Image (cartoon, helix red, strand yellow):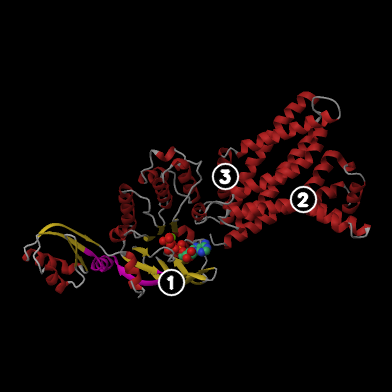
Amino acid sequence: MIRYRAFTKAYGGRRAVDGLTLEVPAGSVVALLGPNGSGKTTSIKAAAGLVRPDSGEVVLGAEHLNALDARARRACSFLPQRVSFPETLTGREVVDFYRRIRHVPGDATDRVLKFASLNGAGERAVGTYSGGMVQRLGLAVATLGTTDVLLLDEPTAALDPEGLGAFYRLVDARRQAGGTVFFSSHQLGDIERLADRVAVIVAGRLVAEFTGRQLAARLADRGVMRVRVDAPTAGLLERVRALCPEAAWRGDELIVPGPASMRPGVLDLVREAGGDIRGLTAEEGRLDAFYRELIGAPS
Amino acid sequence: MISLRSVLWLCARYELVLAVRSRWLQMFAVVFAGLALAVASAGYILSGGHGVQDFSRTAVSLVQVVLLLVPLASLVFGGLALTPDRGAAELLYSQPVPRGAILIGRMLGVWLALAAAELIGFGIAGLVVQSQAGLDGLSRYGALVITAVVITGVFLAIAALLASLNPGRRTRVLAAALVVWFVTVVLFDVAVLGIASMLRSGSASRLLISATLINPVDAARTGALLAIEGTAAFGAASLALLRFTGGAAMAAAYVGLSLAAWMVLPLWLAARTLSRADI
Ligand SMILES: Nc1ncnc2c1ncn2[C@@H]1O[C@H](COP(=O)(O)OP(=O)(O)OP(=O)(O)O)[C@@H](O)[C@H]1O
Ligand SMILES: [Mg+2]
């Protein structure tokens, strides 16, 4: 588990994180969501013992150790947001170094290199790696041990679909083994697929907590449906506006913003009016608007 | 749990591999060899002959250059090597081992690497000197090489301290390294002489002698010249030094103590600073 109690950290008088109280229960996966500069990295680094709280505390692991306690380092594994390695070492040398530091048996090196799909590139110098390969190597190092707590700062940035798949399977396995995973992301896909809960942090403050499903529903309600219609009858828009006042035409596309639940009704109206539906897309609500809404700012 | 000794060794080896692959090291070895050879032949040419001078003279002529260049090389190379960029530092210092052990282990690795470059560089020059001028004074040349290795350790310890004070900020570490070099190698002696010139002769000489033991560069110079030239090293000044310290053995002990302190204290402070720093 991880527990933040009124964790506060300021840089040069500006509060990066302001009174964060949050619990990540053992055996669960919690995502930290928020705009750039909202304090995600600062919060995760505090759990990794790299940032000292100005006030409040962070405890973690089965023994509820303070994150600054040296013993807490053995209970968790951290992947930094922009992980980097010496360019002249090979991937295998990097993994081997961290494996020894963490006191993990020798066969782990091959296991994590394989998991990271680096088995070919393991013998190459890190300086020749692409951005995604460096990220995969970072994930390989972070998953060397079988630590209780996994702290991952934007683990999926730069990963391709295959890397994503491998990463999702890894998190599932950790959850099943009773581990705790706390990660940050800007990707709704990660959150929907992985997170049991989502904590939203804006300007250093926790503004909302949702289950993964609740978040998806909230965002879907803020989505937009676009329907391409041939031969619409006059007066269709008026009838649609009875359901959705903000509906509008853009060329031959009917734009219908609003909750997903009203979309079937709109489609029925189009068909009743003799409209021929040629295409249909729906997109989820944008996160930036959602953040503004959560902190009560005008959009 | 991995033992502290294993951490030190693991990090030293890691750093040694990085240093060997960085090409800087080969460059240093070449520079040291070239320097020693240049000094060995220059002195001879100035005195109207040709070939190279023997080990003793070469060693004496090299002391000043070594004490100018080796601190600079150690501060710069050490400062760069011991300041990992942010993404590397975050991963390194979130591991379940004391941060100080990682830093000191890596510092030892850089020391091993630079010492190897010095041994190889001076060794190559030594082979040339030996073939031309024989083995006379080899032990004195050896004392010079040891001085180089020791002063490397001192300035790497200081580099480790600078790195721990500015985690992840190479430019600042580099700037601080240049300031430290200028102060210890250039400014300190000038300042001490300036102050001494304003004092009465008794206090002035006490100040000059203490200064010789306090500044690591001066301490190393004193030690090297005592080892190379014996008690006659600097005429009246050495007599005063020996009177002040109570004999050659005591003088050597003071020098050794000063250099050891300059290695241990910065490392201790570095480990302490790093363990409390935000990374
Ligand atoms: N070492 C530091 N020195 C000064 N300010 C910092 C430092 N680290 C973070 N900050 C500031 O703290 C705030 C929060 O930064 P943080 O890195 O935690 O944001 P984040 O949510 O991870 O953003 P992103 O999505 O861009 O990764 C920002 O305003 C940032 O400028
Ligand atoms: Mg971040």
Relative depth, front residue between A130 and B109: A130
Q: For the magenta stretch, what is the residue range?
A: A202-224
Q: Is residue A16 visible?
A: yes
Q: Secondary structure at mark 3?
A: helix
Disc 1 residue lies near ligand 1 with CB under 8 A: no
Q: Position of residue A245 (x, y in %)?
A: 19, 73
Residue at left 71%, top 42%? B149
Q: Which residue is mark 1?
A: A20
Q: Is residue A69 visible?
A: no
Q: Which residue is mark 2?
A: B186
Q: Which residue is mark 3?
A: B15
Q: Position of A240 compared to A179: left or right?
A: left
Residue at left 23%, top 68%? A221
Q: Chain of mark 3?
A: B
Q: Are marks 2 and 3 on the same chain?
A: yes
Residue B42 appears in which quarter of the rendering? top right
Viewer-side label of 1, 3: 1
Note whether B89 is above or below B130 in the view shown: below
Q: Mark 2 vs mark 3: which is more N-terminal?
A: 3
Q: Position of A94 compared to B155: left or right?
A: left
Q: Circle 1: is it few (<14), some (14-19), or many (20+) Cα within 10 Å?
A: many
Q: Amino acid at mark 1?
A: Leu
Q: Quadrant of ligand 2?
A: bottom left
Viewer-side label of 2, 1: 2
Residue B206 appears in which quarter of the rendering? bottom right
Q: Circle 3: is it few (<14), some (14-19), or many (20+) Cα within 10 Å?
A: many
Q: Secondary structure at mark 2?
A: helix
